[in-house]
Amino acid sequence: MGSSVYSKGKTIQEAIELALEQLKASKEQVEIEIIEEGGKRMFGLSYRPALVRVTKIKSTDDSINEIIDSYEEEIDLINQVEENLSEIEQVKREPEEQLEGKVWVKDGEIFCKNKQNQYPVVEVGPNVTLYRNQAIVKGTTIIKEEDELILELKEERIETVWSIEVDQSYKTVRLHIKPGVHKMYVLKDQPPSTRIKLETEQLKIPLLQLKKEDVISKLAELKIKHGVDASLIERACQATEEGTYKIVTATEPIEGKNGEVSFLVEVDEKMMGPKELGNGTVDFRETTYIPTIEEGTVFAKIDPPEEGQEGKNILGEPIPAPKVYPILVRTGKGATYLEEDRQLVATLSGRPEVKRQGHMIRASVLPKFIHAGDVDVSTGNIRFTGDVDIHGQVDENMIVDADGDIFIKGNVSNSFVHAGNTVRIKQNVINSKVEAGKSNFVVANLGQKLGVIQAELAKITRAITQLYQVNAFKQADTDSVGLSPLLKILLDQKFKHFKPVIKEFINGVQENNDMLDEEWAGLANRFKSSFLLLHPEGLQSIADLEKMNRFVNHVYQISILPPEPNASLTCSYALNSDLFCSGAINIEGKGVYNSTLHAGGVLKVNGVFVGGSGYAGLGAVVTSTGSKTGVMTKIKVPAHASIRIQTAMEDTIVQVGNRSHKFTKETENVYARLNDKHELLLY
């Protein structure tokens, strides 16, 4: 035999049906044994419930394995019945006079014994309905042996509820199931007493109505065929508590690798500790390591991208792996790229310089020019493709321009200094303009504008595509003149701000053409022809527009990462000057007066910042701003950055994102930043 259950019901049929539901079997698959038929009990009071034993029939092999277990269960049942009968007999054996005038409950039945001049009292509790001689009892009643009592106990049946949720990306399916339950109430046993209250306890029988086949069928109906966890579905169907199960999971794609550059030598400058000399003394001047390589040295290897592995969604459709990008290699003076070997080779001896911009690198090898004295009219301007060291000062109206680093030991007065990477000025900057890493800052600024253009161009493409799908629009009308007439209407009416951004981009490219790669100039020319001049041969079809979208994205990818993180500008003091750096600006001495500072990275002023303005892409740290006389001084950072000022004087303005504050009195320990609600905090 298989598993057995005992089941109670008002009738034999009801007890059998409850057992069949619990075993998930039909009548043909079970054997039924009637233990109690139910009906009227002792003293003519109440009705006892029907009790059946239902056993699921198993194969001969399975039955043999369970004979011992079934035998032990029967012995336990016999022992239990004997104990119950013994208790009943004990009650019967109690002296007749001790039961007279009392009522009690045993095994769901009400018993009582009459007594002259006294009747037992029964109070009906919750979940119980009592009929005395076919009349419903409300509250309390007396009972006699000859009364006909019928009990009705509350029952509640809640059906199983389940649902399937498919996520919009077709990557997961969740099964939510709330199993059904059959709630039954049975009377609690109560000892003989002159008054009792009928009390119940609740029994909960789970209704495991959901079948694995029902879920599988629903998934098939939804055309879900990949990633189904059949074993989890089966466990979920057997659950007796409410829960949610992820029964279907897509196979995620495996990411590939973008192209990478592997350096075979050190290419970045490093700050090192003081150098100990052979005589035991320490040289504090040799604290910077500047790498150098010899002509013919292979200093980098370019690794190609590795494609990822596609996944599969729950519909069985492929999920493409994320796109991978190769490294775009550009070489400057002193370096060449051997494409067949994917190697960068030095053609000069000097300092390797590698500038990273998104997925592009620009590699050069720069020699160093050392100028022992001042830069003045007697020496002329210094322009050099490499690094420049000046051991004197830069006098009025002179220019120092280098592709690499510039080091100036003295002052810079009324002059212009530009370095492609880093500028270090040991003394002061007065009435001068100093730029560090501007070429890459130009790329970053143009990239920001290109990001706006890219988003708007995508909207314009969608708008034209929708117009082509309208019946009233005749595509033949554009076959001869291209998209120019349609673009003119859209740019004049719906995208009025698009042309101004295009003009700014074109102007920026033209002004800095010598600092940019050919892609930028090519893109500016295409923008001018297609959107400003609206040349009929510019954009002929939607395919041309989509091709331009791809080219815009290609150029945008070059500029999306922060340019030249190693660029920096350092000096002791600045007066009436413009300092511009695509990386960090560090003022190490007295401070800054009436100057304009623009740092793509962190702006740090150890002294005072009085008059003028400063921008810091990664945040600003200043000891003191403004003066007691109320000189306007403004510091601005993006929304994600912060401003720290130890002492902010009157007329200091701080701006974080588009939120700003002007101080009207001296304030200590300013910490300006935005919170999660985009509110400006100052402390």
Image (cartoon, rainbow, N blue to C red):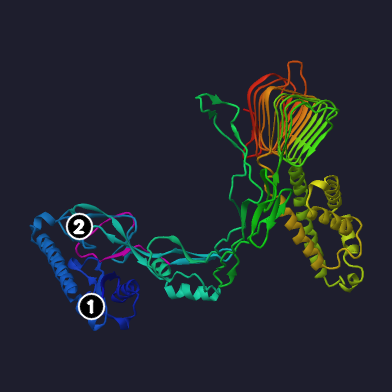
Between 520 and 623, the one lying in front of the other is 520
Q: Residue furthest front?
A: 279
Question: What is the span of residues highlighted in magenta in the rendered image?
Answer: 138-159
| Residue occupying the point 88% across, 55% down | 528
Q: Left of 494 or right of it: where is 118? A: left
Q: Left of 281 or right of it: where is 201? A: left
What is the x, y in percent for residue 481?
A: 92, 68
Mark earlier in primary sequence (1, 2): 1
Q: Does the magenta stretch include residue 614?
A: no
Task: Assess disc 2: are there few (<14), some (14-19) or many (≥20) residues with their C-alpha within 10 Å of its C-alpha.
Answer: many
Between 112 and 677, the one lying in front of the other is 677
Observer able to see residue 624:
no
Can you identify the residue that label 2 sits on? 104
| Residue occupying the point 31% across, 81% down | 29
Can you identify the residue that label 1 sits on? 33
Dot 1 amino acid type: Glu
